Amino acid sequence: MKKYALSVLTMTMALSSGMVAATGPVGEAQSATANLIFTAPSGIAHDVTPSATLAANTLLYSLTPVATGVVTLSGDVASHPTVAVTFTNGTQNWIHRNSRIITRQGGEETITVRLYETYGDQNTAMSIIDDGIALNQTNPTGTFTYQLQLDGAHTVVAGTYPVHLNAQRWEL
């Protein structure tokens, strides 16, 4: 029994002391590097303000502004001087990709509205994209304005016409 116990003890010591096959480097090591760049998060704010002078049951002409939108960027404005503003509700108006048919809340009456750049803004160029517009600044300031206009003449029935819009940085 002593021989058996001594054999087991010897075997256990041999295995735990590393008498198994040795491992190590073979050949030359090759190095690689990576630059991990952490950029400041870019912020975006978006507000839409309805026009104060909207009157129902009167003829409103095409291009009448019904709201003004402002998109403000923070962070690296110069490298991404473009924003997109798009509709997220309404029915696509196939005549203009930047317009939507909006139904009165609780009714069947509709108006057609379109997104458009603010008149007279020499710093911003507009491109029409699916469901909205892209605004690109030649001299990036980080503040973009746009208009929501009637698309065609309307005699609007009194009520609320909800318009849902998204704004985000955009790559042209």
Image (cartoon, rainbow, N blue to C red):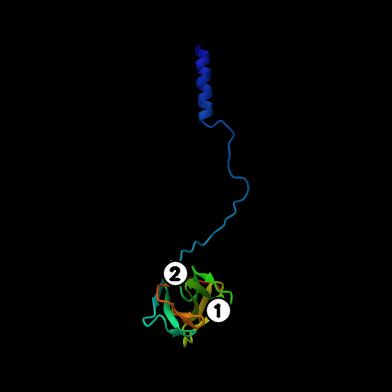
User: Residue 139: in sight, yes or no?
Assistant: no
As drawn, the label of residue 107 is: 2
Mark 2, residues whose alpha carbon is within 10 Å: few (<14), some, or many (≥20)? Answer: few
Q: Secondary structure at mark 2?
A: loop
Residue identified by numbered label 1: 127
Residue at 53% from the left image edge and 70% from the top image edge: 91
- Between discs 2 and 1, the one toward the N terminus: 2
Residue at 46% from the left image edge and 75% from the top image edge: 77
Amino acid type, mark 2: Gly
In space, the residues marked 2 and 1 are separated at their CA atoms by 33 Å
- Give the foreground label among 2 and 1: 2
Name the one closer to the observer, 82 or 25: 82
Residue 104: image x %, image y %? Answer: 44, 71
Residue 73: image x %, image y %? Answer: 43, 73
The number of numbered discs placed on residues in the rendered structure image is 2
Looking at this view, name the residue that lies furthest to the left.
Answer: 52
Name the one closer to the observer, 50 or 7: 50
Image marks 2 and 1: residues in contact by CB distance under 8 Å: no
